[in-house]
Amino acid sequence: MKVLMINGSGNEKGGTFTALSAVAETLKAEDVETEIVQLGKTAYLDCIACMGCRNGGKNRCVFNDDIVNRIIEKAEKSDGFVFGSPVYYAHPSGRLLSVLDRVFFAGSSAFRFKPGAAVVCARRAGTTAALDVLNKYFGINQMPIVSSTYWNMVHGKTPEEVLQDKEGLQSMHNLGKAMACLLKGIPQKGNAFVYGAMTNFIR
């Protein structure tokens, strides 16, 4: 089994990568292979609704000069997905949205019925709005949405700050556990997850 992860951050080793790595660590412990695809600092073309992918495109975007078709090819061989993004003005990164628009429009069959999860990283706020945007890709494509014991978010401006968000990281590990259980079809009874301290909960 394999889970394909997409890092929508321009900083390949930033907070979003730190969150994805925590999910990957747990998946590895569950004998699930992972791969993180880095979108990096490249600017990606938006979908221009040329319909070429629907008119003989064979589940591929007609523009073959960037990463989009390679992601579709990887998706066809993957069993689950995690999309990660920093939060910019309460939404995911533009590069990630441009890629996902084209990937899902041209290659939706590579994702359909496979579980997906979104994780976001923010200094402070905008996380739930960004998650809502990413979860809509799963919801419109008949994909089970994988959740955790809190919303799939970490807080921190730097990787070092993210590592201090113990509750956020525990949510990432619990997300990895939930993804593995879903992929393996293993029912969990009782408290199968570690909840950790509520470090960002206001009492």
Image (tube, grey):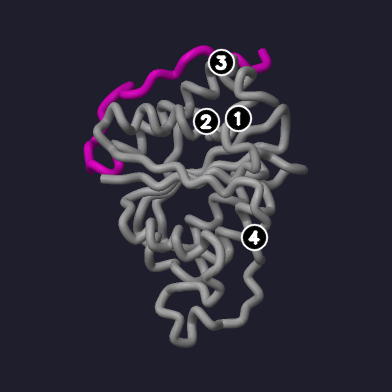
Q: Which residue is mark 3?
A: 198
Checking the image for residue 19, the label placed there is 2
> Which amino acid is tagged 2?
Ala
Q: Which residue is mark 1?
A: 15
Task: Pick whichever, 78 or 135, lies toward us.
Answer: 78
Q: Helix, strand, or loop for circle 3? A: loop
> Which amino acid is tagged 3?
Met
Q: CA distance from mark 4 to mark 2?
A: 23 Å
Residue 197: where, in percent of width, then height? 52, 12
161 lies left or right of 77: right
Checking the image for residue 44, the label placed there is 4
User: In front of the other: label 4 or label 2?
Assistant: 4
> Which amino acid is tagged 1?
Gly
Q: Residue at x 54, y 43 (%)?
A: 7
The reply to whether the C-beta atoms of the residues labelled 2 and 1 are less than 8 Å apart is yes
Q: Which residues are magenta?
A: 182-203
Q: CA distance from mark 1 to mark 3?
A: 20 Å
Q: Helix, strand, or loop for circle 4? A: loop
Residue 169: where, in percent of width, then height? 50, 23
